Image: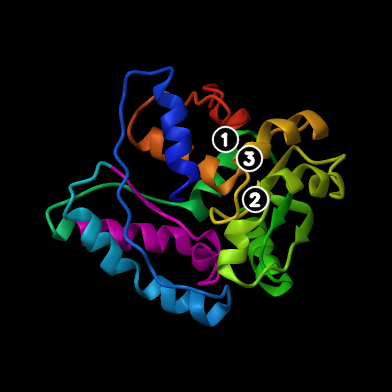
Amino acid sequence: METEIPALLKAREAIAPERFTFHSARMRMKHVTKEELAKMDGDSDRCALELSDAKVDVMGYACLVAIMSMGKGYHRVSGERLAGVAADNGGAAPVVTSAGALVDGIRALGAKKVALIAPYMKPLTEMVVEYIRDEGIEVVDYIALEIQDNLAVAAHDPMNLPEIAKRLKADDVDAIVLSACVQMPSLAAVSMAEAITGKPVVTAAIATTWQMLKELDLDTRVPGGGTLLSGAY
């Protein structure tokens, strides 16, 4: 969240007049386990309160799996609650979750079937897959990289992803989720993955940026942001 979304907004500044500042509040989490994720989500109200002091124009909740591990459809519950926290502090702002943004971004592409790559352990990846399926999107195939340490997720080389994507059974899918996680870097590999697979490629960070721009009522064309940020959606 703190690397790829600012990078996308900076890329947009090269072609559009708007300028952005980026503010963050951190929920603590070291290992990507269901227990730590639940504890982390419980800290989200504090973060929303802190950010609302800055009177930001839009808030983005990172950690897709933290939302998805809390139960199907939870991105709606979380977004509404956090927006309420901000409003009660006099800093009303729309709240975008990476979980909800990924689902909405896939839908915006008109994709009914996807294949995805996630850094999580297999049980958490399966939870993500079931969450997306519950939203009416068919997940045809997925690869779990099974990286439990959160810093190791951030250190994963994004240029490994196009080769990993080749292992997906993706002939029949409409789009590929190259990273179902804002923590795992993927931006540098998106254009290559689209060229190699011949499919639209989306990531959690790209989808979150797209939905933030939509909430701000701004044009969604961002260089290097793949099909979803081509400006057509």
- Where does label 1 land, which residue? 108
Q: Residue at x 43, y 20 (%)?
A: 14
Alpha carbon of mark 1 to alpha carbon of mark 3: how far?
11 Å
- Where does label 2 land, which residue? 179
Q: Position of residue 24 (x, y in %)?
A: 33, 54
- Where does label 3 land, which residue? 202
Question: Left of 56 or right of it: where is 171?
Answer: right
Q: Which quadrant of the structure image shows residue 47?
A: bottom left
Q: Position of residue 174 (x, y in %)?
A: 75, 37
**Tag 3–tag 2 contact (CB < 8 Å):** no
Q: For residue 95: magenta?
A: no
Element at label 1: helix
Q: Main secondary structure of the magenta part?
A: helix
Q: Nearer the viewer, residue 78 or 185?
A: 185
Choose the circle earlier in sequence order: 1 or 3: 1
Q: Is residue 96 above or below residue 228?
A: below
Alpha carbon of mark 3 to alpha carbon of mark 2: how far?
8 Å
Q: Which residues are magenta?
A: 58-86
Q: Is residue 123 visible?
A: yes
Q: Amino acid at mark 2?
A: Ser
Q: Position of residue 218 (x, y in %)?
A: 36, 26
Q: Amino acid at mark 1?
A: Ala
Element at label 3: strand
Element at label 2: strand
Q: Is residue 114 visible?
A: no
Alpha carbon of mark 2 to alpha carbon of mark 1: how far?
17 Å
